[in-house]
Image (cartoon, rainbow, N blue to C red):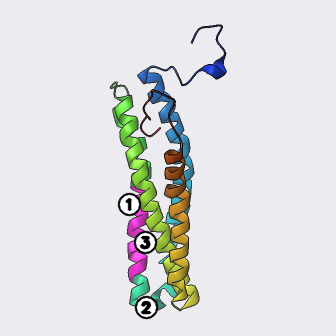
Amino acid sequence: MTPTADPSDDPGRHETPEERADRRWTDLLQELRVAQTGVQILFGFLLAVVFQPRFAQLPDTDRNIYVVTVMLGSATAAALIGPVSYHRLLTGRRLKPQTVAWASRMTVLGLVLLFCTMCSTLLLILRVALHNPLALWLVGGMAVWFLACWFVFPAWALARSSPPDGEERAGPE
């Protein structure tokens, strides 16, 4: 782009691979802050449940759902905190583009695990609250909503977008 050109005519960013990696890392950190906060609150809640007096009265099925939920919550926390560790251990080794790519993959895995954790948590809570099969239907409906909000709507937006003439669509930001 020339200094006198209109910036609105610019078809894309003009960044070096390092600048792009820095921008993508900053974006990813902001996304992780949101997800990590929610996971930490949910995981804290899950850890406290076992110490409630009513926990001992839960049927085996609900206790098994609880164990699965805690394990999913642990895996979710690991996947969503993992990019920070990955970045810290590789900082200064001139691997930022690769670090961002792997951190992005770990974040997507963390979101999939978070989906499973949320559904499992809802199942446990609604089974205890309702004591009837309606719990499964409600969890199923909410699972569809999570899938739509987290994966289907973004995929739909991506499919509907078209790259400028002559350019290929770039990978995930």
| Residue 145 percent coordinates (x, y) | 56, 66
Number of marks in picture: 3
Is residue 52 at least partly visible in the picture? no
Q: Nearer the viewer, residue 143 or 94?
A: 143
Q: Secondary structure at mark 3?
A: helix
Residue 69, placed above or below residue 60: above
Q: Which residue is mark 1?
A: 75
* Residue at x 51% of width, y 40% of height: 29
| Residue 64 percent coordinates (x, y) | 38, 81
Give the dominant element type of the magenta stretch: helix, strand or loop: helix
* Residues at marks 3 and 1, CA–CA distance in whole angstroms: 10 Å
Q: Nearer the viewer, residue 108 or 168?
A: 168
Dot 3 amino acid type: Thr
Q: Which residues are magenta?
A: 64-78
Q: Which residue is mark 3?
A: 69
Dot 1 amino acid type: Ala
Residue 8, placed above or below residue 159: above
Dot 2 amino acid type: Pro
Q: Secondary structure at mark 1?
A: helix
| Residue 12 percent coordinates (x, y) | 54, 25
Disc 3 and disc 2 in contact, CB within 8 angstroms: no
